[in-house]
């Protein structure tokens, strides 16, 4: 979307951009976002990832992996989780072999407790329920014109681009793909489905 406005990509991590786009985290942007959301005259869309792949990604990238800054995610959060729940990390850099399936099961417990009972801490945005994120926009007056699955991102994003007034055409097939988190955590040793036995699936339902 940044490219469609400017014909160029943002030079850096878009999460850290402080100008050139509106973000709710910026107080100066909030009135404009609120106004357009309530007026419902701007195309609004979101995408949702399967909860199974999402929680796996959270475990590997946020809990087991070292962040780009060279530190653990959210400082002491990781140690606060691994000690009471016994989550294995794959060594200090997340690259050593460990029982990934057992670690996921324990991580699911550590994600379930804050979401269901707000203890031992508030739930983290990366593994709290997606419906909560989507509902926040709706509860504050917004409506989504498009909701698509992350696993079908090209098809879903093309529908958004076709419906949106854009300044610069976007050829999705030519857009470079990369994952900023890739390489900072362990590689999956199994297909996604292999991680989720009956107990793990039940915990996902609770989350």
Image: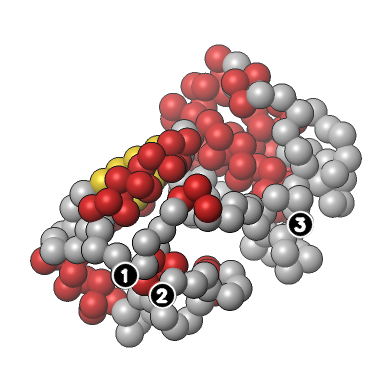
Mark 3 sits on what residue? Answer: 66
Q: How is the image coloured?
A: secondary structure
Q: Is residue 124 visible?
A: no
Label 1, label 3: how many angstroms apart (C-alpha)? 38 Å
Is residue 49 among what the camera can see? Answer: yes
Label 2 secondary element: helix
> Do labels 2 and 1 touch, CB within 8 Å?
yes
Question: Closer to the camera, 128 or 18?
Answer: 18
- Judging depth in this view, the residue of 2 and 41 nearest the camera is 2
- Outermost residue toward the top? 198
Q: Residue 41 location, x and y as percent?
A: 13, 64
Mark 1 burial class by Cα count in 10 Å: few <14, some 14-19, many 20+? few
Looking at the image, which residue is at 49% across and 22% down?
202
Q: Position of residue 140 (x, y in %)?
A: 20, 60
Q: Which residue is mark 1?
A: 167
- Mark 1 or mark 3, whichever is nearer to me: 1
How busy is the neighbourhood of tag 2: few (under 14 within 10 Å), some, or many (20 plus)? few
* Residue under numbered circle 2: 6
* Residue 155 vertical position relative to residue 32 in the rendered view, above or below: above
Front residue of 167 and 203: 167
In the depicted structure, whether residue 193 falls above or below residue 68? above
Q: First in sequence: mark 1 or mark 3?
A: 3
């Amino acid at each position: 979307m940044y490219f469609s406005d400017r014909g160029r990509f943002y030079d850096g991590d878009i999460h850290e951009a402080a100008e050139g786009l509106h973000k709710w985290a910026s107080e100066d942007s909030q009135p404009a976002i609120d106004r357009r959301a309530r007026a419902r005259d701007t195309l609004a869309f979101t995408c949702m990832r399967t909860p199974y792949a999402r929680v796996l990604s959270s475990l590997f990238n946020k809990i087991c992996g070292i962040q780009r800054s060279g530190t653990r995610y959210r400082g002491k959060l990781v140690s606060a989780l691994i000690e009471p729940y016994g989550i294995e990390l794959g060594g200090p850099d997340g690259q050593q072999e460990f029982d990934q399936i057992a670690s996921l099961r324990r991580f699911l417990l550590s994600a379930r407790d804050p979401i269901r009972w707000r203890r031992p801490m508030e739930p983290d945005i990366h593994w709290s329920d997606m419906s909560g994120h989507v509902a926040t926009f709706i509860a504050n007056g917004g409506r989504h014109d498009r909701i698509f699955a992350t696993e079908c991102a090209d098809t879903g994003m093309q529908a958004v681009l076709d419906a949106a007034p854009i300044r610069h055409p976007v050829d999705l097939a030519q857009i470079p793909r990369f994952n900023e988190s890739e390489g900072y955590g362990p590689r999956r040793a199994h297909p996604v489905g292999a991680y989720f036995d009956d107990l793990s699936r039940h915990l996902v339902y609770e989350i």
